[in-house]
Image (cartoon, rainbow, N blue to C red):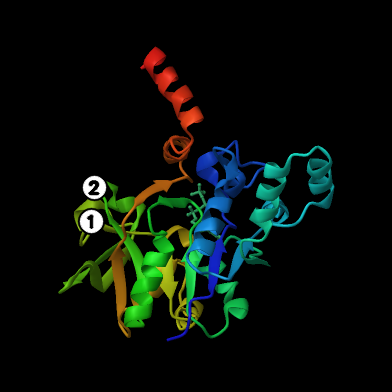
Amino acid sequence: MKKVRKAVIPAAGMGTRFLPATKAIPKEMLPIVNKPSIQLIVEEAAASGIEEVIIVTGRGKTEIVDHFDAHPLLEDSLRRAGKDALLQEIIKATQLVKVTTVRQQRPLGLGHAILCAAHVVGDEPFAVFLPDDLVDSERPCAAQLIDVYQRTGKSVLALMNVPREETSQYGIAAGTFVPDHERELLIEALVEKPPAAEALSTLAVVGRYVLDPSVFDYLRRTNPGRGDEIQLTDALAQMVQKQALIGYLFEGERFDAGDVAGYLLANLNWARKTPRLWRSVQAWVKAHG
Ligand code: UTP
C-alpha cells in the first residue's frame, strides 16, 4: 500500500460569503484566535503524516504563500528583542511540511482546482483538505481517513450527519454501512447539494478526502455542473460506478469557517483551549448573556 504523503489544499475560491472582509484578504488568512485558519489545516496535515501540501492559489492569495515562507527580517527582530517563544512559533509554522503552490488561473470550480495539482501529486494516493472545514478532534480527521485507506486501499471521504433541511449545502452520500465497521459506508451514490426532498440520505461529505490518483482522469472528463463549476462530487459520482469509495463518519467536531457564524463558533471553540481567553469570554457572556 502506498503511503499518503501529499495533500492538496484548494484555496483559490473567491470567498463571497465573507465579503467585504475577503475583498483584499484571502479568507484562509482570517485568524482563528491568533493563527490564520489555513495554518490549522497545515498543522492537521502534518499531524496526519503528510509530508508535502500543495496549496492551490489564485489572484489575491499571495499572503498565504508568504505565511509559510521564512521572514528573516521579522525573525531577526524577534531574536534581538529576546522574544524567543514567538520566534519559535513563527519558525515552526514554516517547517511543518514542505509547501508547494500551484495556481488556478480561473475559478472554474473545486474539481478544476484539484486538477491543477495533478502534475505535483503524480501517481500516488493523496489527501484533500478543504480549508473552510476545521475539525477539532483527538485524532486528526485526515489521520482517521488515512487509517481507513491503509486498511482498505479504497478512496475515503469524510462524512457527517446533518439535519435534512441542510442537505442542499453539501454533497450527499448514500450507501450501505460495512458490517463490523459501523463508521464506514460503502458509497453507492453521491449527489451535489440536493434539495431536502430529493436527498437520498442526510450523510454529508465534509472537506477531508483520501483519493486514488485515478480521480484525475474522472475530473478531466467532468463537465461543469452546479453553479457552472467543475465539481469534485460529480467526478466522484462517476468514479463510484467503477471503484469502491468509502464514506467515514469521523470522530470530532467540524466548523465551517467559510461562513460567518461557523467562523465565530470556531473562534470560540479554539479560544476555549486557552484558559485566560476563555475566562474573558465567560465574563463577557455573563455580563451580556
Ligand atoms: P466554495 O464553494 O466554498 O467557494 O469553495 P469559495 O469561493 O471558497 O467561498 P464562497 O462560497 O464564495 O464564500 C470550496 C473550496 O474550493 C476552493 C475554495 O477555495 C474552497 O476551499 N475553490 C473553489 C477553488 O480553489 N477554486 C474554485 O474555482 C472554486
Which residue is nearer to you in this view: 202 or 145? 145
Among the two numbered marks 2 and 1 on one chain, the one whose residue lies closer to the N terminus: 2
* Secondary structure of residue under mark 2: loop
- To which residue does mark 1 refer? 202
Q: Is residue 98 left or right of residue 173?
A: right
Say if 285 sits above or below 248 in the image: above
Q: Is residue 14 left or right of residue 239?
A: right
Which residue type carries mark 1? Thr
Q: How far is mark 2 from mark 1, CA to CA?
A: 7 Å
Q: Quadrant of the C terminus?
A: top left
Task: Give me the residue at 50% from left, 28% from top.
Answer: 276
Say if 119 sits above or below 141 in the image: below
Q: Is the C-beta separation of discs 2 and 1 under 8 Å?
A: yes
Q: Residue 34 carries which label?
A: none
Task: Give me the residue at 40% from left, 13% from top.
Answer: 287
Q: Quadrant of the N terminus?
A: bottom left
Tell me which corner region of the image, top left, top right, bottom left or bottom right, holds residue 145.
bottom left
Q: Where is residue 28 in the image (x, y as percent from the top left)?
A: 58, 49
- To which residue does mark 2 refer? 163
Say if 147 sits above or below 105 in the image: below
